[in-house]
Amino acid sequence: MSDFEIRTLDPGEHRAASNLFRGSLHVPPSDDADWERASRAFQPGGTIGAFDPDLIGTARSFDAELTVPGGARRPMAGVTGVAVRADRTRRGVLRALMAAQLEDFAGRGVVFASLLASEAPIYGRFGYGLATRYRSYTVDRHRARLHPGAPATGEVQLLELDDALEVLPGVYESLARRPGAMSRPEVLWRLYEGQARRNPQPVKAVVHHGPDGPDGFATYFVDGLQAHPWTKSLRLVDLFPGTPAAFAGLWRFLLGVDLVDTVVAEARPLDEPIELILADHRRSTVDRIGDEHWVRLVDVPAALAARQYGGAEPVVVEVTDPLLPANNGAYRITPDGAERTDEPAALRLDVTALAMVYLGTWRVSALAEAGRIEVRDPAAPAAADVLFGTRVAAWSGTHF
Ligand SMILES: CC(=O)SCCNC(=O)CCNC(=O)[C@H](O)C(C)(C)COP(=O)(O)OP(=O)(O)OC[C@H]1O[C@@H](n2cnc3c(N)ncnc32)[C@H](O)[C@@H]1OP(=O)(O)O
């Protein structure tokens, strides 16, 4: 056990935390101009540090809301900026930072925590489970045509960056959300502004207007002239279609941008129907499937009560949570909701496995077959698959 203390950082210490984080990712510290922008992405009071007496570890969080299956939104903490100085790793500093964060979240009614992991083995031990996944794909612009049945209503409007920064937060807030999506507080828009202004190529936006006003948007940039071998890609930064017509309309626009050879769509929902709106589905190729958000159920009773369930026989699950023992116990999951029970459990799982099935990304039976959920009633996994299943794939689309 090393000797260190953990406390909340003052705003004047945020730059040191940022430098520590950037150093741990092997990138240089921000210069003054970048820091002036990056500092606005720090929520006051949201960064903690470990001191021995130097700052040797840090973790940051900001407040947002997570959308759960059925559409309810509950308080969430976005966790980022996690780093331990290279000469102080593997002696429990991260464990202490995670414990302090979770205690703070639980104490002020946060239901979920969520993060993007630098490495997969790190966060499961703290109750974070891989809760949303993405696929990245590339569309060959010269040969791709929309299917004649693809919706062709609405119009797109091109915005330069300054106007986009004014308009997009309001459009984003107005759109319907998938399970796993989150609100975007001011600190995130400031983060994205900083990234866009630093981007060597101009970042542009298009807003799709449907019959009732803006119903989707995309932001993107195009590789510069120096790209070799002279093929250019349009790279999507954001793509949020609020309706099927907005999805088709935004893609009609993207495939019409001149001097572009491929459109690269990274980290998209697994079930996004790009193949179905193209006349030839092979003009879109999948580049990768990857991890998106790792979610931690901080308040298991509140999280289980917040989501909707599919129609199947009720199942009692027993949850274990070594870090937040208030979550320990049995819960009866039914099509009408979930609550604590004294009934014997049909399934036994830890809070990490619960996070993996909570948004519907993984099937309960798949985790049971992989030995990650203990089955006491052989009929339970199939029923739990239906209870926890979702109509659309969970996805966040918000990265930090
Ligand atoms: C949300 C984000 O910000 S993601 C970015 C995370 N940051 C980075 O990847 C930057 C580079 N890495 C680091 O700064 C550090 O190595 C950290 C933060 C990942 C880990 O910090 P440490 O203080 O070394 O972790 P700590 O000693 O508390 O380890 C806790 C446990 O996690 C394990 N662990 C820690 N890091 C790793 C890792 N990279 N891979 C596998 N296991 C790990 C430890 O072995 C230990 O296991 P145990 O519970 O069985 O004893």
Image (tube, rainbow, N blue to C red):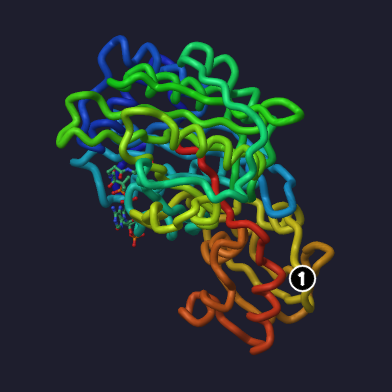
How far across and how far down the image is residue 80, in percent?
Answer: 43, 37
The part of the image, by quadrant, that contains residue 64 is top right
Residue position for label 1: 332
Q: Residue 353: where, in percent of width, then height?
A: 53, 66
The image quarter containing residue 116 is top left
In-image side of 6 versus 240 (left or right):
left
Whether residue 339 can be seen here = yes
Judging depth in this view, the residue of 90 and 80 nearest the camera is: 80
Q: Residue at x 25, y 14 (%)?
A: 31
Q: Which of 322 and 370 is in front in this view?
A: 370
Say if 305 sits above or below 232 in the image: below
Residue 90 vs residue 120: left or right?
Answer: left
Cβ of mark 1 under 8 A from ligand 1:
no
Placement of 255 over or under 319, stated as above or below: above
Position of 391 with respect to 362 (left or right) is right
- Residue depicted at 43% across the width and 60% down the height: 125
Left or right of 94, for residue 43: right
Relative image position of residue 33 (x, y in whole percent): 31, 10
Name the kind of residue labelled 1 in the image: Arg
- Check the image and name the residue furthest to the right: 336
The structure residue drawn at horizontal position 84% and vertical position 64%, both measured from the top left corner, is: 336
- How many labels were placed on the picture? 1
- Give x and y (percent) for residue 176: 69, 40
Q: Which residue is drawn at 66% across and 52% down?
A: 299
Q: Is mark 1 on a helix, strand or loop?
A: strand
Q: How crowded is mark 1: few (under 14 residues within 10 Å), some or many (20 or more)?
A: many
